[in-house]
Image (cartoon, rainbow, N blue to C red):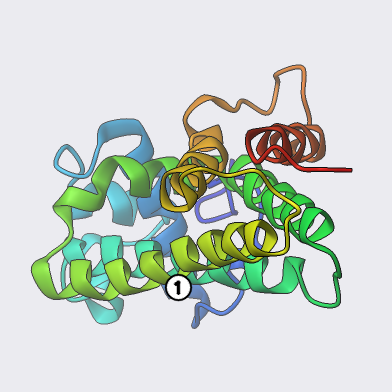
Amino acid sequence: MAPGSGSADGTGGMWAGIAPDASRRLLLAAVDSFADLGYHGTSTRHIAAGAGMSAGALYVHYRTKADLLFQIALTVHESVLAELETAVEGIEGPSARVRALMYGFARWHARHHRAARVIQNELGALEAAHARRIAAIRRRVRALVREEVRAGAAAGAFDVADIEGTARAMSSLAIDVCRWYRPEGPRSPEEIGALTAHLSLRMLGARS
């Protein structure tokens, strides 16, 4: 596989906004190194070699390894948020909105399982200022799910005793896909998305 070729999930769309090309190659190489060796087990030399660059060239684009981890986390979380916001655009009805939301949420975590798994495993390695910024985006993601559950319950479409707890369980169901999904497995990202949407509506006691 060529250095920086998009081996991190094999999907380039999420990384398309990272420029110049050398910065994107380094970011993808960092995802692969963090996935294989862990954040603390990865050196900047590992990352530069994975991108087909010299160790010194890395510092032209990123000050530190911590900055690379933050850029990965920021890209991942902003992509998730955009996916969820887009998923419910123009969708009417509580059940239909939750179905679309959770389908997109789980499918995203299957499609981008490698980068998502890195971030789930390495959140604790973020520097404090970086962690605060990522936490703010994570709150927005949780709020999107919670508000769909709340709106459906208020409309009488869902039978939910604990809105906060149920929304958290639904989010976990989608996010945990990145921990076990394998491209060679029996289910496609789309099939996993459909199953997650179905299970979420069952959790909500959705009324026909």
Instruction: Identify the residue at image location x=52%, y=60%.
Output: 146
On screen, residue 125 versus residue 89, left or right, reads left
Instruction: Decide if residue 95 is on the left or right side of residue 15.
Output: right
Q: Amino acid at mark 1?
A: Ala
Q: Is residue 96 above or below residue 130?
A: above
| Residue positioned 59% across, 40% down in the render | 1
Point out residue 79 in the picture as x, y percentages from the top left corner: 56, 67
Query: Residue 162: x and y, percent?
Result: 46, 45
Q: Residue at x 77, y 60 (%)?
A: 94
Q: Nearer the viewer, residue 36 or 205?
A: 205
Rendered residue at 69%/59% (across/down): 152
Q: How many marks?
A: 1
The quarter in which the C terminus is drawn is: top right
Determine the residue located farthest toward the left in the rendered image.
128
Establish if 64 lies above or below 110.
below
Whether residue 25 appears in this view of the structure is no
Quick one: 55 or 116, which is closer to the camera? 116
Residue 68 appearing in the image: yes
- Identity of the residue furthest to the top in this view: 186
Which residue matches tag 1?
22
* Mark 1 surroundings: few (<14), some (14-19) or many (≥20) residues within 10 A: some
